[in-house]
Amino acid sequence: MRLLFLLFIGLPIIEMWLLIEVGAVIGALPTIAMVVTTALIGAALLKQQGIETLTRAQQRLNSGQVPATEILEGLMLAVGGALLLTPGFVTDAVGFVCLIAPLRRMLIAGLIKRGVMQVQMNQFHTGASPFSADPQGFSGGPNAGVHREPGDGQSQDSVIIEGEYKKEE
């Protein structure tokens, strides 16, 4: 709760103070030009990195892999883009860290290592669709098509999600 308070109250105060200090040294118009320039550069970087991440995610999906890393990178890109559109130098610095690929990957690896974010890579097992004719009947509930291995309790490792897919060209 204190962290949120500091983010929503403290960060804007720091940003305003820093903008005033920089404006006093280089002038108001150059300061405004710097803020607008970082937003434009950030938008261009966001577009480029977003397309690259989306392409990698599509390639992983096409090869039957879960694009977990690309999903986390997409989240970081969204956060970085929002921070770069927010006027201020501190948010711009954090936003650029989120948008520059090597820095973003190091940040994600550090967050995963600290346990802030968790990635669980499971393989998909294809089989009958939960919407197809099922000899046991269609439950229609949230666990339709999800089967657990017998005798293993609620272990995550034993979950099999059945489904069908069709490759569209």
Image (spheres, rainbow, N blue to C red):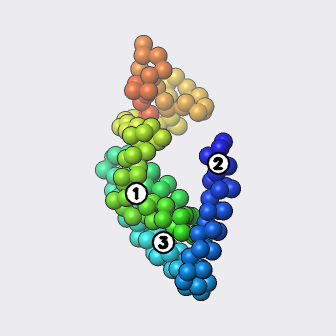
Please name the residue that numbered disc 2 is placed on. Answer: 4
Q: Upstream in the sequence, badge 2 or badge 3? A: 2
On-image quarter of the N terminus: top right
Q: Nearer the viewer, residue 167 or 59?
A: 59
Q: Secondary structure at mark 1?
A: helix
Please name the residue that numbered disc 1 is placed on. Answer: 104
Q: Nearer the viewer, residue 94 or 52?
A: 94
Amino acid type assigned to the residue bearing label 1 in the image: Arg
Q: Position of residue 133 (x, y in %)?
A: 50, 32
Q: Secondary structure at mark 2?
A: helix
| Residue in the image at 38% along x and 36% along y | 122
Question: CA separation, marks 2 and 1?
Answer: 22 Å
Is 1 left, or right, of 102 in this rendering? Answer: right
Q: Position of residue 93 (x, y in %)?
A: 48, 65
**Any mark on residue 42, and which?**
3
Q: Quadrant of residue 52?
A: bottom left
Q: Position of residue 119 (x, y in %)?
A: 42, 40
Mark 2–mark 1 CB contact (< 8 Å): no
Question: CA separation, marks 2 and 3?
Answer: 25 Å
Q: Position of residue 83 (x, y in %)?
A: 55, 64
| Residue in the image at 43% along x and 61% along y | 97
**Any mark on residue 137, and which?**
none
| Residue in the image at 44% along x and 51% along y | 71
Closer to the eye: label 2 or 3: 2
Amino acid type assigned to the residue bearing label 3 in the image: Gly
